[in-house]
């Protein structure tokens, strides 16, 4: 019987889990025992989907990352998109065709982070998508 526990619950404090979704000012975490938990985070906390965290009261404390998938920000900085990935599925549609270079850039970013990329071709079942 899985039940959601509230942040700050004595049962959650000290627990470890993985961030499964990021909601801007909160993250959904799945604790090691499978229990779901929602924690508030600062908007620019640096915590991303895939991060391993430890619950400290009502806070999520980010643990060390194995990998970090990054992209360039419009201002010239670097933005971490996801953490601790082993593989990255890159989805490309046959129709309309993906913009030239997008899949290649994603594959290069994945390889640079030590992540194994693979291509998923979508809509191949459409008529004329030879």
Image (cartoon, rainbow, N blue to C red):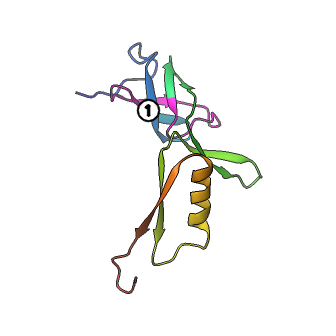
Of the pair 94 and 19, the residue shown nearer to us:
94
Measured as percent of width and height from the top left, residue 111 is found at: 58, 52
Residue located 57% across and 52% down the image:
110
Q: Residue at label 1?
A: 29
Q: Quadrant of residue 120?
A: bottom left
Looking at the rendered structure, the secondary structure element under dot 1 is strand
Query: Which part of the image, by quadrant, shows the N terminus?
Result: top left
Q: Residues within 10 Å of mark 1 (few under 14, many from 20)?
A: many
Residue 36: say if magenta.
Answer: yes
Instruction: Say which residue appears at 57% left-offset and 33% top-offset.
Output: 65
State the image coordinates of residue 48 (x, y, percent, origin top left).
55, 39
In this rendering, the answer to whether 39 lies above or below 120 is above
Where is residue 96? Give x, y as percent.
49, 78
Estimate the x, y position of residue 12 in percent, counting from the top left. Answer: 41, 18
On screen, residue 78 versus residue 58, left or right, reads right
Q: Is residue 10 above or below residue 106?
A: above
Q: Residue furthest left?
A: 1
**Boundaries of the magenta span:** 29-52
């Amino acid at each position: 019987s899985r039940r959601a526990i509230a942040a700050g619950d004595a049962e959650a404090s000290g627990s470890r889990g993985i961030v499964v979704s990021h909601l801007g000012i909160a993250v959904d975490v799945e604790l090691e025992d499978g229990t779901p938990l929602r924690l508030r985070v600062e908007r620019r906390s640096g915590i991303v989907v895939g991060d391993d965290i430890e619950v400290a009261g009502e806070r999520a404390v980010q643990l060390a990352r194995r990998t970090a998938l990054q992209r360039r920000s419009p201002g010239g900085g670097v933005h971490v998109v996801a953490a601790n990935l082993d593989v990255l599925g890159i989805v490309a549609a046959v129709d309309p065709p993906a913009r030239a270079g997008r899949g290649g850039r994603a594959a290069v970013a994945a390889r640079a982070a030590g992540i194994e990329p693979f291509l998923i071709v979508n809509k191949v079942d459409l008529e004329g998508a030879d």
